[in-house]
Structures are given as structure tokens and as C-alpha cells.
Amino acid sequence: MPERDYETFEAGNVTLQSGTVFPALKLAYKTYGMLNPAKDNVILYPTSFSAQHYDTEWLIQPGGVLDPERYFVIIPNLFGNGLSSSPSNTTVPFPSITYHDVIAAQHRLLTERFGITKLAMVYGWSMGGMQAFHWAALHPDMVERAAVVCGSARCAPYNHVFLEGVKAALTADPAFRDGRFVEKPVAGFRAMGRVYAGWAMSHAFYRDEVWREAGFTSLEDYLVRAWDATFARRDANDLLAQIAIWQNGDVSSCAAFGGDFDGALAAIKAHMLLMPGGTDRYFDVRDNEDELGKLTNATSAVLRPIPSVHGHRAGNPVNNPRDFAFLKAEIAALLSN
């Protein structure tokens, strides 16, 4: 792991949405750029599944998608990622955490540590995109813009089933005993990677052997080097905790909206950019199409599918210039509103 370069917000003993008290909750975060005197140049950039800020900060660069010379960018690390409170660094049994708990902690970070009351944009990919949607609904007067990249306002049934397959592959390892991993699940990590490889990329990606563009010599070479060890760098119990957050994601599942999904989306006032991957298999374009029609009070709401064969990974286009250019142009247009 890289040398520690982040800070920690000590939230204290926090009562979660479930009613459970989480003792000494910790939110790890990193900032980029400078907060201006008006404190209105803030972009919140929450992390995605299994990612730490090290994995996603490549998007923050001068003249890039998120420009630290113009904006004060904050990456809050999602609970369960090994930096913020997670099963791997918590001595007590890890409780059920929801996106609503996540946003509540992030809100405290922004207001208590920085005095921030306005967000120029919340930008997120995948689980980060789900957080962006939650932010826009839960704090409509605070969020000016939200970019939901390959994300949704709730976990769709198809998405839930995909994650059931991921969990089943991981927990089939004999290291999983009595509801938790007691050692590193070597076979489980490989099985999880193989399952993920089929869902994360598209039919066309494999049909056209697009993996060759990245220097892989065969399909098996791609699977071994790109997927077999992808998740082995993380703690397996941490991964299960994040999958639980993901599967239970729903902006309306809270006291404020009482399960009224349409009402939760109607509460959003921000400029909304929904940018699904055109070939994403689990954050399906059709879910964003449905959500778009419910954003009745948003200042603006547009749907811009990424025209890519890279499936879900189109939203995190590392070494993918075409998708990166599309992403950059759409975010620039959003920020110009």
C-alpha cells in the first residue's frame, strides 16, 4: 500500500440507520486543490466498490475531468474499503451500514471540518454514482450538480442478482466459516474475479478481442492478469460489507421519504447528469431512463450513455482515451451550467 497520504475524520459514536451505535466511526478522506474563500468550489468524489482514493484519484489532474486548479476536490473513502471504518480495522462486530449512514458521515465531514454548505458537484462512478444520487436527494439545497456515472438511485433486482453470484463465488471458499472469513480466500478471490470479468465487460468487448489493445496475448492471459487477483488486494470481509451496502441501496429507504421512490427523486433540485455505460450489464441504461422521468424538479436532467464496448468499466476509463474524452466533455458541459 502507498504511504499514508490521507486524513481521518473521527465521527465518534454514531447511531446508524439500523439503530445500532457504531463506536468511534472513522471516515478517511483526501483533498486536492484549495478551498476558495466563498467555499463554493467543492467537488465531492466518493469511491466505488473495493476502491480506495489511490485507485480513483487519477481522474484529478490539471485540465483533467476534475481539475484541482479550479476546484477543491474531496475523496471520502467508502466504509468497508479498509481505510475508513471496515471489518478489517474494527474490533467490534461490523454492523449493517447503508448509503444513508455513509452520506450522513460525509455531510458531517464537510460541515464540521470545512464549513462547507454548497457542493459545486458530486461526482461518482458505480457505488460512487449511487452515493451521488443519494446526496442529491438527501441534500437538495446543498448539491448544485450531480454526475452519476454508471450508477443508479437504487440497486435494481438484476444488479442484486449479479452481486449474489459474486458473493456465492467468494464465500464458497473454505476460508468462509460461520458467516465470516477466517483467512484469505485464495480460491474465492479468483472465482470472484472470473465472475466479475463476465459481468463488468460487454459481449462486444470479448467478441472483438478488445483486450488485445491492452497488450494481452490471449483471453486466458487477460483473465489471469486482469481479473484473477483484482480483489485479492482487499480484505474479503471488507468486500462483503460493501456488497451489503450496494445491494441495499435505495435513496427512498429512509424516514425522510418512507420508501416513496418517486418522491425521493422529485426532491432533487440539482443539475443532473446520468451517464450510464451503453453496454453496462448491471447498472442498466433502462434504470437511468426510468429515473430521468422522475427528476421532475431538477434544474436540468440529461441522459448521456457512454458509447463504449467497455461495459461498466467505461465509466472508469483508465488507459481508454476514447471513453475518457467522452467523459471529460460531458463533465465540462455539466460544470458550465
Image (tube, helix red, strand yellow):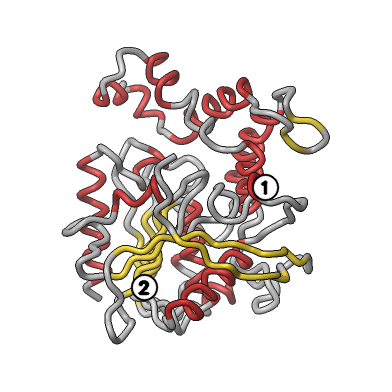
Where does residue 309 sit, x and y in percent of width and height? 33, 36
Element on which disc 2 rests: strand
Residue found 58% across the figure and 27% down from its top: 189
For mark 1, what is the residue?
87
Relative to 47, say whether 331 is above or below: below
* Front position among marks 1 and 2: 1
**Residue 256 versus residue 79: which sits nearer the camera?**
79
For mark 2, what is the residue?
145
Q: Is residue 13 left or right of residue 208?
A: right
Q: Which mark is residue 154?
A: none
Which residue type does callout 1 highlight?
Pro
Name which quarter of the figure residue 317 lies in: top left
Gap between marks 1 and 2, in whole Å? 33 Å
Tally the numbered discs: 2
In which quadrant of the rendered image does the N terminus lie?
top left
**Residue 114 versus residue 255: which sits nearer the camera?**
114
- Residue most extreme to the front: 3
